[in-house]
Image (spheres, helix red, strand yellow):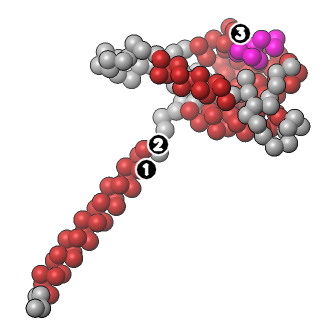
Amino acid sequence: MVMPLSGLGSSRGFAYALAVGLVVVVTAGAVAACGTDAEGIDSCRQLENARCDRAPGCGISLANPPHEGAPDSDVDACKRYYKDACLHGLVSRKDPGDVEVEACEAAIRNGSCDVVKVPSTDPACVFLLEAPPSDDAGTDPDAGDAGTDASALENLADASPF
């Protein structure tokens, strides 16, 4: 039995439109999922680069994460690590601005080795201690539980050279 062309065309047209619509929706969802609302990416990199530069003079090993060419390439490897790690931005999710970041960088570059290890110990870097804002304060039953965020930070710290 031969199917009329008009019936075949409309079925194919509908199926094609449905497939194209599905591809558009899936693609749009994937692109949206790849976005970031990270704040302070450049500030993070600036501060971490200062720490990477000072670490060898403070006796801080930059052997982790393991990398090719160690120990001669330790500082460069540290900077490459933070180029990616800083894509999450600052923990506070707020960029304090150039003046505060430059003051903190100066404290890291010129201060004691304790500041290189934990920059927030210097008053110029105290903004690094700021807690990130709560996204759903009052509506999230786990909002008071910082365990998830702390675990994520600890996992990142385990890979960190510092």
Q: Name the residue under label 3.
A: 122
Tell me, yes or no, whether the two marked residues, 2 and 3, touch with CB atoms within 8 Å: no
**Corner quadrant of residue 110:** top right
Residue type at the position of mark 2: Gly
**Quarter of the image with the N terminus in it:** bottom left
Q: Is the magenta stretch mostly helix, strand or loop?
A: helix
User: Is 162 situated left or right of 26 in this image?
Assistant: right
Distance, label 2 to label 3, CA atoms, is 33 Å
N-terminal of the pair, mark 3 or mark 1, is 1
Q: Residue furthest bottom?
A: 2
**What are the residue bounds of the magenta stretch?**
112-119
Label 2 crowd (10 A; few <14 / some 14-19 / many >=20):
few
Identify which residue is drawn at 85% across, 18% down. 58
- Residue 162 shown left or right of residue 127 in the figure: right
User: Residue 35: which disc?
Assistant: 2
Give the residue at mark 1: 31
Q: Residues within 10 Å of mark 1 (few under 14, many from 20)?
A: few
User: Residue drawn 71% across and 15% down?
Assistant: 118
User: Which element carries disc 3, helix, strand or loop?
Assistant: loop
Q: Quote the CA–CA distance across marks 2 and 1.
A: 7 Å
* Quadrant of the snapshot with the C terminus: top right
Q: How many labels does the image show?
A: 3
How far across and how far down the image is residue 38, in percent? 52, 33
- Is 118 inside the magenta-drawn segment? yes
- Image quadrant where residue 60 sits: top right
Image-based side of 54 in relation to 37, left or right: right
